[in-house]
Amino acid sequence: MKRAYTTQPVGKSPKSNSKTVSKSMKSNKPRGTKPEKILSMLLKKKIERNTLPGNPDFIFPKKKIAVFVNGCFWHKCKKCNLPIPKTNTEFWKRKFERNIERDKINKKELDNLGWKVFEFWEHDIRSNPDKVLGRIKRYVTKDVRQYSP
């Protein structure tokens, strides 16, 4: 199934002129971020590799629950309102627009498959991990018929 994006493809990321920035960007990982590890520890569950749309960080297949941990920078958290990098701003604007659009498409595809989707921001997990854990546990321990989509 081909996805219908409205935003332009981002393309290859530009080379950085700064060794510090380059080193920082290379250290960004798509999996195993600190907030994901915190939630993994609290859930006593490994970060999942799966074939669901968007590859959720954690899944509960029997309850059809998918959990995403969104980094505030990469997914443009409105609460943190982190600035766009000052160099290559057009690239970064496209990158963030595409990330946000992809998140919406993933959520819609999962909804269509009957999955309950949770998205948690990095700052929520860092500031109040027990609240995040409680929210997930409430749905994981519920009877599926109580919230069927």
Image: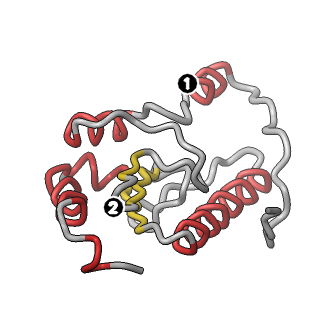
Above-or-below relation of 92 to 104: above
Mark sitting earlier along the chain (2/1) = 1
Identify the residue position indicated by label 1 in the image.
Answer: 27
At a point 40% along the width and 61% down the height, the residue shown is 64
Q: What residue is shown at x 44% (from left), y 31% (from top)? A: 32
State the separation of the CA atoms marked 2 and 1.
Answer: 34 Å
Q: Residue at x 59, y 53 (%)?
A: 54
Above or below 78: residue 73: above
- Disc number for residue 106: none
Quadrant for the N terminus, please. bottom right
Determine crowd level at label 1: few under 14, some 14-19, many 20+ residues with C-alpha closer than 10 A.
few
Residue 149 place in picture, x, y as percent: 42, 80
- When the figure is inspected, residue 1 is found, relative to residue 129, above or below; the finding is below
For the point 81% across and 36% down, the residue is 14
Which residue type does callout 1 highlight?
Ser
Above or below, 21 against 129 in this view is: above
Q: Amino acid at mark 2?
A: Lys
Q: Nearer the viewer, mark 2 or mark 1?
A: 2
Q: Nearer the viewer, residue 51 or 72?
A: 51
Q: Dot 1: what SS? A: loop
Tags 2 and 1 touching, CB below 8 Å: no
- Pointer 2: what residue? 63
Q: Secondary structure at mark 2?
A: loop
Which of these two is toward me, 104 or 98? 104
